[in-house]
Image: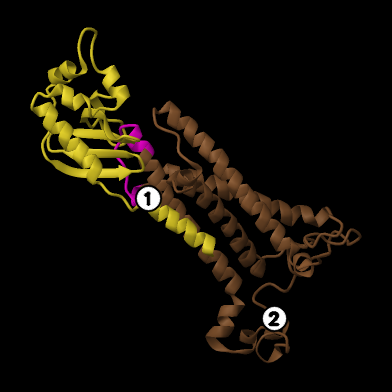
């Protein structure tokens, strides 16, 4: 019986006790940077793999991000499960991942393609 | 101490191999999890971090619930259902809750019977069904834990795939939950059916789960 209670405690810790603040703050900083044309600052908040895939030849990550003219806006909702998060902004949906150095944006400029289907994102990894 | 070990060796043996298997599952699961972390560009996690993940919790809980369900059904089904020739069945004609005399309760309790077997009312009802209630409670809690941990693990995977997370209601009526559940149930039910049927004709000398070797095939409710 004690083992069952322990399993429940682990499940609770793993699944329920979440702080949505950190991914929301990263998403807000990213949105503020992209909407004010600060591509380099926004790129610093991208996951390494996403930032590496983004620019075309001869471009910097910041230039490529500025060209996309992503929209932002205030945070409407945050879903956080494990090391993954989805932040809905007024004008965009972002997907983030928690790395050792903190939350980084894996995908941005995302639009839904239907229930249970992956979002179609302007920027992803 | 030696006497305690000898008199409880069956429980202690299974508790020991349970603990070893659980540690083995955690180590193997951590290695598999960290392999996937590398593929996804994440960092490896420690064993302590891994056993606190929903991935580990759902893998443990889905097996627990099916095992406790198996024994719950075995306990309850053998009240009413019989199998001619099986040592796992009681004798034919004894189907049902049986008389107080057969069950040694109430005025038929012996001096060494549990105290609540002598009592009436709720205490008698509780002790008369306590094994089923506890197995059923652990089954229900484990199944609930599987659903919560499975939802957490599944939603992390969905977000990693750039998909919307789903609700608990959506998860427990969806294919992932029932695939995990039924793949465990079918194997448990087959194992019980095999045990009931094979023990009619096959013997394991000295085992409490087998008839004595020379016992006839149609002898029912006889354990060695």
Relative to B92, does residue B68 appear above or below in the rendering? above
Query: Is residue B159 within the magenta segment?
Result: yes
From the viewer's perspective, tell me whether residue B112 is left or right of residue A22: right
Q: Which mark is residue B189?
A: none
Residue occupying the point 39% across, 42% down: B154
Relative to B97, does residue B18 appear above or below in the rendering? above
Q: Which mark is residue B103?
A: 2
Question: Between A7 and A111, which is closer to the camera in this rendering?
Answer: A7
Question: Between B72 and B1, which is closer to the camera in this rendering?
Answer: B1
Q: Which mark is residue A15?
A: 1
From the viewer's perspective, tell me whether residue B220 is left or right of residue A21: right
Report the number of numbered marks.
2
Residue A49 location in percent, x, y? Answer: 32, 23
**What crowding class fits label 2: few (fewer than 14 Cα within 10 Å), some (14-19), or many (20 or more)?**
few
Residue occupying the point 44% across, 54% down: A10
Residue A25 location in percent, x, y? Answer: 19, 40
Residue occupying the point 20% across, 36% down: A27
Tell me the CA gap for discs 2 and 1: 45 Å
Mark 2 on the same chain as mark 1: no
Relative to B18, does residue B164 appear above or below in the rendering? above
Question: What secondary structure is found at the residue carrying circle 2?
Answer: helix
Colour chain A is painted in: yellow
Q: Which segment is the magenta one?
A: B157-170
From the viewer's perspective, tell me whether residue B165 is left or right of residue B142: left
Q: Nearer the viewer, mark 2 or mark 1?
A: 1
Q: Judging from the image, what is the letter of the chain drawn in brown?
A: B
Relative to B92, does residue B27 appear above or below in the rendering? above
- Which residue ends up furthest to the bottom in the rendered image? B107
From the viewer's perspective, tell me whether residue A29 is left or right of residue B109: left
Query: Looking at the image, do the residues carrying marks 2 and 1 touch, with CB atoms under 8 Å apart?
Result: no
């Amino acid at each position: 019986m004690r083992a069952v209670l322990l399993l429940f405690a682990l499940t609770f810790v793993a699944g329920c006790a979440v702080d949505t603040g950190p991914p929301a703050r990263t998403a807000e900083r990213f949105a503020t940077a992209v909407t004010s044309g600060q591509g380099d600052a926004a790129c610093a908040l991208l996951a390494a793999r996403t930032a590496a895939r983004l620019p075309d030849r001869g471009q910097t990550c910041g230039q490529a991000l500025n060209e996309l003219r992503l929209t932002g806006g205030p945070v409407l909702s945050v879903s956080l499960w494990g090391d993954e998060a989805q932040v809905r902004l007024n004008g965009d949906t972002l997907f983030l991942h928690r790395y050792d150095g903190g939350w980084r944006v894996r995908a941005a400029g995302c639009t839904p393609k239907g229930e249970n289907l992956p979002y179609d994102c302007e920027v992803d990894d | 101490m030696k006497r305690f070990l000898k008199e409880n060796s069956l429980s202690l043996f299974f508790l020991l191999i349970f603990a070893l298997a659980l540690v083995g599952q955690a180590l193997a699961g951590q290695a598999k999890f960290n392999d996937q972390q590398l593929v996804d560009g994440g960092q490896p996690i420690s064993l302590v971090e891994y056993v606190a993940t929903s991935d580990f919790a759902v893998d443990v809980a889905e097996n627990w619930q099916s095992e406790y369900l198996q024994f719950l059904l075995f306990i309850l089904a053998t009240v009413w259902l019989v199998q001619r020739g099986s040592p796992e069945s009681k004798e034919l004609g004894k189907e049902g809750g049986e008389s107080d005399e057969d069950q040694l309760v109430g005025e038929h309790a012996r001096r060494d019977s549990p105290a609540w077997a002598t009592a009436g009312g709720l205490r008698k009802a509780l002790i008369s069904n306590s094994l089923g209630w506890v197995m059923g409670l652990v089954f229900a809690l484990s199944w609930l834990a599987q659903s919560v941990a499975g939802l957490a693990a599944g939603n992390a995977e969905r977000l990693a795939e750039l998909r919307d997370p789903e609700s608990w209601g959506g998860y427990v009526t969806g294919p992932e939950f029932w695939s995990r559940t039924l793949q465990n149930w079918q194997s448990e039910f087959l194992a019980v059916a095999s045990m009931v049927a094979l023990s009619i004709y096959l013997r394991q000398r000295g085992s409490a789960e087998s008839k004595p070797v020379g016992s006839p095939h149609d002898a029912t409710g006889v354990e060695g």
